[in-house]
Amino acid sequence: MYREYLSRLYELLAKDYNCTPQDFLREENVLTESAVIKGGRIYSGEKKFFSMVTLGGNAVVTADKALHPFLSEFIKGNKGHWLFELPKLFEINRELDKHGFTLKPSFHMQLPYKDVMPKNDYPVKWYFEREIDRFYGDKRFTHAICDRYLENCPDRIVVVALDGDEIMGMAGCSEDAPGWFQIGIDVCPQYRGKGVATYLVTLIKNEIIRRGGNPFYNSAVGNYHSMQTAISCGFKPTWMEVAAKRKDEKE
């Protein structure tokens, strides 16, 4: 299972980083000029000013040509994963600042590596496509779904666990690239610690796989509760990315 998802990931990242799938298997770091390529993750519709990824070996960097003189020296002679250490990220941020950009938060990204069956049996309800619109603006579900319908990464599936008429928690997925579904989870405070997150994430992960899609999950660098949920649901930490945004751009 994992090797197949990893092979598909190389193909996706090659579009995101304007490179070849083989570039992620090299020993040396790779620098490319950013481009918007059909089939990749296109969140804003604009070329990335800076983005860097590692799968634990080398780093692949895509960026505006204005950054290439700095980046070509920056990546030279360093192992790829070292470029994600804070001192190196500070260097990148100082350079980005000269161009009116700053780094976004970074995440550990995870792929399925084993089958897991749900361990609980809470009542659930499923919502699909534009049925999900009813939940936009609900502050309880800021991680499970987007804040509104987005053409470039639309929410596709939502599953909620129920305690009578009360929603205990919600897992949702957005289609961030063709066939690639990012999972998010929110559990209401009074229901935390009851296995709701693991139950719902497992359900939606299995449903995505049943439909022939590629599920993935991300956790903020310090959010070990989220990472443990992913691991319990059969995910495995696979890659890490860091990217830039304009300093006046909202998250």
Image (cartoon, rainbow, N blue to C red):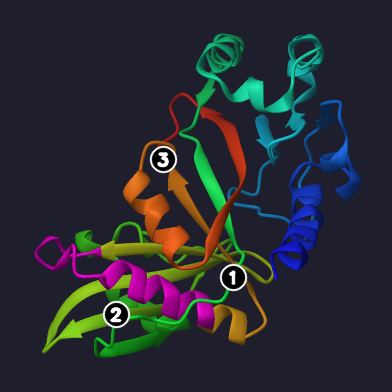
Query: In the image, what residue occupies the spot 74% across and 21% down?
Result: 79
The amino acid type, in three-letter code, at marker 3 is: Glu
Which labelled disc corresponds to residue 49? Answer: none
Report x, y in % for residue 25. Answer: 85, 41
> Is 41 placed above or below 100 here?
below
Residue range corresponding to the magenta coloring: 187-206
Residue, disc 3 = 251
> In the rendered image, which quarter is residue 148 located in?
bottom left
- Magenta residues: mostly which secondary structure? helix
Which labelled disc corresponds to residue 114? Answer: 1
The amino acid type, in three-letter code, at marker 2 is: Val
Report x, y in % for residue 177. Answer: 66, 63
Does the magenta segment cover residue 199?
A: yes
| Residue neighbourhood size for the residue with mark 2, other residues' Cα within 10 Å, grouped as few (<14), some (14–19), many (≥20) | many
- Say which quadrant the C terminus sits in: top left
**CB atoms of marks 1 and 2 within 8 Å:** no
Residue, disc 2 = 160
Q: Is residue 178 visible?
A: yes
Query: In the image, what residue occupies the spot 30% across and 57% down?
Result: 142
Report x, y in % for residue 194. Answer: 19, 70
Q: Secondary structure at mark 2?
A: strand
Does the magenta segment cover residue 28?
A: no
Query: How far apart are labels 3 and 2 at the CA level?
Result: 26 Å
Query: How far apart are labels 1 and 3 at the CA level?
Result: 33 Å
Q: Secondary structure at mark 1?
A: loop
